Image: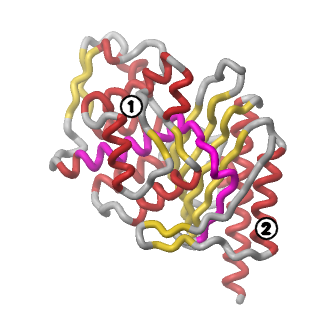
């Protein structure tokens, strides 16, 4: 499979995203990422933005199915809706048993199975979507507060364009081809995390989403694995797909932000599309890239400190 990489130079929201300086180190980082991508039967896309400015992308030209990564986009649209309508995260939503679909991933359904109705706060539903990637909770928020189309429009209003959100979880479950209609480029995902951290109001809504991302329980074998004992803070959202009719895993993804103990930070998005590997080997691609980026940023930080 032919792999392509380009360094991104973008003017976005008044911020000039500069490419990381073309030193031997930077080339080495790109070569390492490309080498990891080339070792597996999958299409791998990566974007990294360091300290809000230095940006690299690898295989960013493709559209990658987001899978549950779009639940981060949804959370931003939901909290914007609450903010604009002066509604609290504690606002209650009453859920009927018929809304808890039996044939999808849903810890929410497993907990409340048998209840005719249950009332949960928006905060609780967002916790299910962001921490546990619950599909029923996601679709309840789509149906009750902000639809996929409204979510798409809100994210575009923030200046992100290289993505699409059209489908609910149930629609994707009914027809796996719909998974490819909720897509993004890696850079668009990394940029959205930059917007979240630096441009959205620093209020209780943003603080809640940030903390919920930091306590994410899914995908511990991806971006999180090499950072577990480093003292770094990582907030992220994962996405995991089924196999398509060709037997390929539609998508295994992870995207988020990392804050190092010394204050350096970066946003990172790794998307793996149409993988012919096992789920474990596919997740390892993301972990290997995460470790490579972390070590590189640690190295250049150390060099800058000794200058």
- Residue 121: image location, x then y, percent: 25, 35
Among the two numbered marks 1 and 2 on one chain, the one whose residue lies closer to the N terminus: 2
- As displayed, is residue 114 above or below residue 136? above
- As displayed, is residue 238 above or below residue 5? above
Residue under the point 59% across and 44% down: 254
Residue under the point 32% across and 27% down: 140
- Residue 112: image location, x then y, percent: 35, 18
Question: In which quadrant will I find the N terminus?
Answer: top right
Question: In which quadrant will I find the C terminus?
Answer: bottom right
Residue 27 tag number: 2
Residue 138 tag number: 1
Q: Is residue 169 left or right of residue 121?
A: right
User: Which residues lie in the magenta part?
Assistant: 54-81
Residue under the point 41% across and 66% down: 198
* Nearer mark to the viewer, of 1 and 2: 2
Q: Is residue 102 left or right of residue 297?
A: left
Question: Which image quadrant for residue 301?
Answer: bottom right
* Crowd around label 2: few <14 · some 14–19 · many ≥20 (10 Å): few
- Front position in the image: 297 or 121: 297
């Amino acid at each position: 499979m032919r792999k392509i990489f380009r360094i991104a130079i973008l003017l976005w929201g008044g911020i000039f995203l500069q490419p990381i300086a073309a030193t031997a180190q930077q080339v080495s980082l790109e070569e390492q990422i490309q080498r990891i991508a080339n070792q597996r039967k999958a299409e791998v896309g990566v974007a990294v933005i360091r300290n809000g400015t230095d940006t690299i992308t690898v295989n960013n030209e493709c559209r990658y199915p987001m899978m549950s990564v779009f639940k981060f986009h949804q959370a931003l649209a939901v909290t914007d809706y609450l903010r604009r309508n002066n509604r609290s995260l504690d606002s209650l939503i009453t859920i009927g048993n018929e809304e808890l679909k039996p044939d999808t991933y849903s810890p929410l359904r497993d907990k409340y199975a048998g209840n005719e109705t249950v009332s949960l706060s928006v905060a609780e539903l967002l916790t299910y979507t962001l921490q546990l990637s619950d599909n029923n909770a996601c679709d309840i928020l789509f149906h009750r507060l902000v639809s996929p189309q409204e979510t798409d429009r809100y994210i575009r209003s923030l200046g992100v364009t290289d993505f699409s959100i059209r489908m609910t979880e149930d629609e994707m479950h009914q027809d796996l081809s719909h998974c490819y209609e909720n897509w993004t480029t890696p850079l668009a995902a990394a940029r959205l995390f930059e917007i979240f951290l630096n441009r959205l109001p620093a209020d209780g809504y943003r603080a809640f989403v940030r903390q919920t991302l930091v306590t994410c329980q899914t995908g511990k074998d991806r971006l999180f694995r090499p950072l577990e004992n480093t003292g770094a803070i990582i907030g992220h959202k994962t996405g995991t797909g089924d196999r398509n009719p060709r037997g390929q895993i539609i998508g295994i993804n992870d995207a988020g932000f990392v804050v190092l103990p010394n204050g350096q930070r970066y946003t990172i998005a790794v998307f793996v599309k149409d993988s012919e590997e096992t789920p474990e080997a596919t997740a390892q691609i993301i972990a290997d890239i995460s470790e490579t980026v972390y070590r590189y940023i640690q190295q250049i930080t150390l060099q800058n400190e000794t200058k």
